[in-house]
Amino acid sequence: MPTQVRIRRGTTAQHTTFTGADGELTFDTTKKVVVVHDGATVGGLPLEGWLKLTPATTLTTQTIAGPVNITGGNLDTPALTIAQPSIIGALTANGETELKSLVIQQEVLTYASTVNLNFKAFGGKRLALTGNVTFTSSNLGFGRQLLIRLVADASNRNLAFPAGWKFMNGTPTALVANKTALLFLWCFNTTDADVVAFYIVES
């Protein structure tokens, strides 16, 4: 039988009070991951949930539990390209990220006298008005945006919005019959007072 080599091991709880030597590796038996030590950090640095990519690396269909660290690349030779349709729950990029095309998923809202605009759901929404409508909001958050297309039926339809929304070109009160309007919403904090709105209507 070949010689078996085993490194020191312990549970996650045991690692929280352990400081390994600089360059030492241990094994976390709870998380089933290797832990790198630097001689100073208590608990070490668990190697969990990371995927490091270099340019020209193909990432096939899979679920990644932790951050993806992509190195290299520039505006002429991107470090990451996505060739097929993809759904990304959240994307954070340091510096500038250039997108050649971005498709924002849409949902059709069902008309009711009160319609909630969920800032954490689809970024694009479509609503056909068959009556007057009062809008409410939910899941406000830093950087969240919505684009809503409103279409009136054969009657003028009154519009009401949450108190605190700041309209850049005047607060609309109604959508004229058979007209289409676009409502842009940008959220800069977690309350309705932090929502900036811009409304344009078909001439």
Image (cartoon, grey):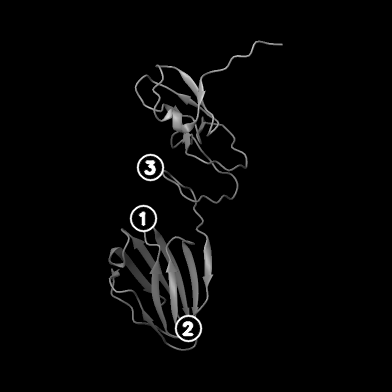
The residue depicted at 47 percent of the width and 32 percent of the height is 12
Q: Which of the numbered marks, if any, corresponds to residue 96?
A: 3
For label 3, count other residues whose C-alpha is less than 10 Å away and answer few (under 14), some (14-19) or many (20+).
few
Instruction: Give the percent coordinates (x, y) of residue 59.
Output: 59, 37
Query: Residue placed at 43% from the left, 17% from the top?
Result: 23
Rendered image quadrant of residue 64:
top right
Q: Please, is residue 154 above or below residue 140 in the view?
A: below
- Quick one: label 3 or label 1, which is nearer the N terminus? 3
In the figure, 7 relative to 131: above or below?
A: above
User: Mark 3 and mark 1: span between their CA atoms?
Assistant: 16 Å
Q: Position of residue 197 (x, y in %)?
A: 33, 67
- Nearer the observer, disc 3 or disc 2? 3
Q: Secondary structure at mark 2?
A: loop
For disc 2, the neighbor class at 10 Å (few under 14, some 14 to 19, many from 20) is some
Which residue is tagged 2? 178
Indicate the amino acid at tag 2.
Asn
The image's mark for residue 87 is none
Question: Which residue carries the number 1 mark?
Answer: 143
Q: Amino acid at mark 3?
A: Glu
